[in-house]
Image (tube, rainbow, N blue to C red):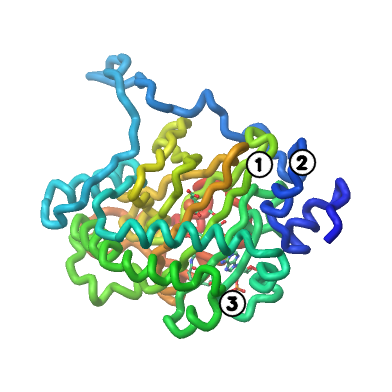
Amino acid sequence: MAPPSLNDFRNFAVTKGHGAKGISDLRLDALPDQYIQPPEERIDVTKVLDKEPRFFLVSDNGQKRLSDAVFLVVPVIDISNLDDPVVADRIAEAAEKWGFFQIVNHGVPVEVLENVKVAARRFFELPVEEKIKYTQENSPSKAVRLTTSFIPKADKVLEWKDYLSLFYVSDDESSKYWPAACKNEAMEFMNKSEFVIKWLLKVLMQRLNVEDLDSKESLLMGSRRINLNYYPICPNPELAIGVGRHSDVSTFTFLLQDHIGGLYVRKLETDFWIQVPPIPGSIVINVGDALEIFSNGKYKSAEHRVAANGNNNRISVPIFVNPSPGEIIGPLPEVLENGEKPIYKHVLYSDYVKHFYRKSHDGKLTVDFAKV
Ligand SMILES: COc1cc(/C=C/C(=O)SCCNC(=O)CCNC(=O)[C@H](O)C(C)(C)COP(=O)(O)OP(=O)(O)OC[C@H]2O[C@@H](n3cnc4c(N)ncnc43)[C@H](O)[C@@H]2OP(=O)(O)O)ccc1O
Ligand SMILES: O=C(O)CCC(=O)C(=O)O
Ligand SMILES: [Fe+2]
């Protein structure tokens, strides 16, 4: 296919199916205008807290003073002993104070993690004629969709990312419709993660006094979606963004990132961003909007984003653990038992998700859809 004319990059990436990878492969000297983010959406290094100790203004008996030095690190939790109550405490605390944490020694075999990253790369390296079979217009199933950016028709400026989104309906559907280049590895990652996903949910729910998970399985984790994200090498990465500021709409997200790095989380109640460093074999867990709503705001779905990279392609593979689309989500009765006032109302989960997909990434605004 002929390379795009200067003004035709959007058409080339979106309509013709070449994606950000197709543009990356052209090895342009400069980032096309269609990808240049306004300054406020670029990663501002002065707002990134990395490794250096920081001081915050705190209030002591009405007196303002600088806090002791704080090193900000997203919690890394060793979950090798699933029965240890200290582990459960750390998870609940991280979900409240950060909305983000990493788990290590989680029992998902390293080769399963490696295989799904290799498979993602294999899929994105297919010729465009193969990949285009999975775009919204051509896909054999609604459960499989290849997209570039986030929602190209809503995104005024495109994000520097391609993603294959696979909705899990059944093993049979996955085997029939998911692309051969990655389906076995994606299924294996989902299956081998199921045990730890259920255990995490149990721990998070126990702290909300929710004990009977069986009757709530469809509400809390009745559907799953796995995305294969590909962030190709970017000319002028400082002008672009891999994924813009957003919170996930899931109950929680079980995210595998490769060794490249670039995922940033906003420290709650501040304007500062902290990198979630790649740790070999770890999984990043982030609270999604549905869990923030179930917990009436006790657990926080933190805003996060991904930088573009000028030297390396990056892969990440989130499993979004979601309510069933037909469930009504709202603060759980157990959470409101003590007379706490609900800050969220009840909404149909598929309406909530459609609201998310109707607009570009906009930080934490999606959750306003469910605010009282
Ligand atoms: C950060 O960058 C991201 C993040 C994400 C996803 C993050 C998540 O947290 S995913 C959790 C999503 N939840 C679910 O998957 C729940 C189960 N799914 C559903 O309930 C349904 O798929 C549905 C979302 C309710 C849509 O189904 P349906 O009622 O049949 O309507 P549709 O016509 O298919 O879609 C409505 C509307 O949404 C757009 N859309 C749907 N799915 C996707 C998708 N996977 N990717 C992109 N857009 C999607 C669709 O285009 C429709 O819009 P129209 O304008 O065409 O009407 C994901 C990607 C990131 O980059
Ligand atoms: O690539 C990453 O590390 C995170 C991607 C992400 O936030 C998402 O897909 O929702
Ligand atoms: Fe996300």
Q: How far is disc 2 from disc 1 in space, using C-alphas?
A: 9 Å
Kind of element beneath mark 3: loop
- Residue 133, quarter of picture: bottom right
Secondary structure found at label 1: loop
Mark 3 neighbour class, 10 Å CA radius: few under 14, some 14 to 19, many 20 or more: some
The answer to whether any part of residue 41 appears in the image is no
Question: Of the residues shown, which amino acid type is indicated by label 3?
Answer: Lys
Which numbered disc, 2 or 1, marks the residue that appears first in the sequence?
A: 2
Instruction: Please report contact status of discs 3 and 1: CB closer than 8 Å, yes or no.
Output: no
Q: Secondary structure at mark 2?
A: loop
For mark 1, what is the residue? 234
Q: Quadrant of the N terminus?
A: bottom right
Q: Is residue 351 left or right of residue 360?
A: left
Q: Could you tell me the amino acid type at mark 2?
A: Leu
Which residue is the extreme one toward the right? 5
Q: In this rendering, would 285 be left or right of 367?
A: left
The residue labelled by disc 2 is: 28
Q: Position of residue 294 (x, y in %)?
A: 33, 60
For the question of whether residue 52 can be seen, the reply is: yes
Residue carrying label 3? 142
